[in-house]
Image (cartoon, coloured by chain):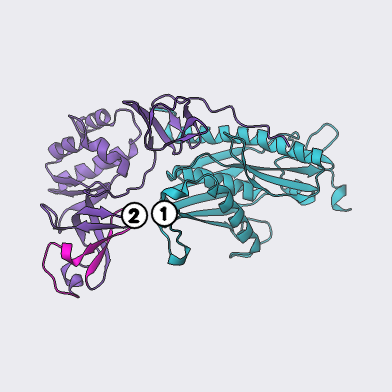
Amino acid sequence: MSSSGASDGRTSAASGSLVIPGDKISSDTSDRLGHGVMKLNGEMIATKLGYVVVKAGEISITPIHTAYFPRPGDLVIAYIEGMRSNIWFIDLNAPFNAILPMSLAPMKIDYGGTRDAMNVGTTILCRVQEVDEAHSSVVTMKGMGLRKVNSGFVDTIPPHLVSTISSGTNAIINQLKDASNCRIILGANGRIWVDGEPEGIRLVRNALAFVRDNEHSTDLAGAFTGHLANGNGE
Amino acid sequence: MGYGDVQMIDENGNRVDGRKAGDIRPIEIELGVVPVADGSASMRWGTNYVIASVYGPMEAHPRKIQRQERAVLDVRYNMAPFSTTDRFRPGFNRRSREISKVTSDALESVVLLELYPRSKIRVEIEVICAEAGTRCVGLTAASLALADAGIPMTDMVVSVASGKINGIVVCDLNKEEDNYGAADLPMGVLPNTGELVFLQMDGDLSPSEFQEAWDYNMEAALKIHVIMKEAIANKYGGGQ
């Protein structure tokens, strides 16, 4: 039985091009495999929908959509989802929840006193301490700056934009801090805590909406600078 | 007058909707139609209208469905009560369960499930309007939704059904052809390698007719793959 119809459409993808799962990126398998790329039948193919990035001998895909997978050391902004007598369950904006044991809480509490210390819905700044092979993670609030958050508001950006908006000499996050005069903490899980005057907070909200709407643009930092100069769309 | 007496293709090869034997119905695709989902896609194929949405990976509940070494793909195919002319009784039935299973089996061939041990990826396929070939539309839309959700896959799955009407093999059966035709062969294909991930057959086809239907499906899968890529490029831009 013939199986005619195998696509010849696997053409090599140039850096910056949009690829879908199955698209051939390169026949040259000497390059290192980055995120979203795998070797199949002697070719490098994309496994995710996104843009090809070729950098320093490594081929990877910047995906259109990512989920946040915690890594040890990540500073995250999280919510308390539930508790038991000696443990809190934490929403990290990740596919899997984390736990915060009583021993790693910032305050001394008695067994059974978790609800009085931090109730459901509380926003916290914490750090990922460990992640096991089943993606279950443990967070800690013992450390500099780790605390309950009692003021301000929390917004969210796609996790893959975290490094984009925090890197570079004219990083978006620094521009935002200067323009809004607000305290801003960017979590590795894509959540951003903002605290300050109402005008500053409004500026930050509008700016983050612009970032989300233009996340796939070539020069996001440049576009953001222009957007701020134009009055942030107000 | 029996089923075999219904004339659905004339001597010039024109079908009741004006198509030729190898033509597919018009297709429109849109991504990101369910904002609360991690990935979603809607597909209009002829009069079919299907929405697929993907959630996950997430923790697998109940715990008994967890697999230690890989994720579980939980696919649910459902037809809305208003999707057919006669009211379709709501709820999961034997047909929905069968289509859910074959769709899940097809998608498991391409999704890299081993990257997410002990987790679950939920795929919901909702048929809003049905006009023959809903399982093919659902499987194709689910593949788009998985890509939109950032779930890693080795290839996209494209599904299409050919069949036999009045003794002639044609591609992409519409409602009348599906109801009054002599055979129906839905297939799920990986367009980049030509591999088969889903195959069912209803009715009778001779070996040569089977080969003809197979070839029609393979050719149509490539055309549909191009349409899928165009829809994705329209949504996310052709490149940076």
Which segment is the magenta one?
A86-112
Location of the C terminus of chain A by quadrant is top left
Disc 2 residue type (three-letter) = His
- B139 versus A20 height, above or below: below
Q: Residues within 10 Å of mark 2 (few under 14, many from 20)?
A: many
- B54 versus B156 height, above or below: below
Tell me where residue B65 appears, x and y as whole percent. Answer: 47, 63
The residue pinned by badge 1 equals: B117
The residue pinned by badge 2 equals: A135
Name the tint of chain A in the rendering. Answer: purple
Is B240 inside the magenta-drawn segment? no
- A186 versus B117 height, above or below: above
Foreground pick, B56 / A192 = B56
Disc 1 residue type (three-letter) = Pro
Q: Residues within 10 Å of mark 1 (few under 14, many from 20)?
A: many
Chain letter for the residue marked with disc 1 in the picture: B
Q: Secondary structure at mark 2?
A: loop
- Left or right: residue A92 versus residue B84 is left
- Which chain is the one coloured cyan? B
Res A6 → quadrant: top right
Instruction: Name which residue lies at 27% across and 46% down.
Output: A190
Foreground pick, B221 / A106 = A106
Tell me where residue B183 appears, x and y as whole percent. Answer: 78, 47
Contact between labelled residues 1 and 2, with CB atoms less than 8 Å apart = yes
Chain letter for the residue marked with disc 2 in the picture: A
Is A108 inside the magenta-drawn segment? yes
Res A176 → quadrant: top left
Instruction: Name which residue lies at 56% across and 27% down.
Output: A9
Res B46 → quadrant: top right
- A181 versus A79 height, above or below: above
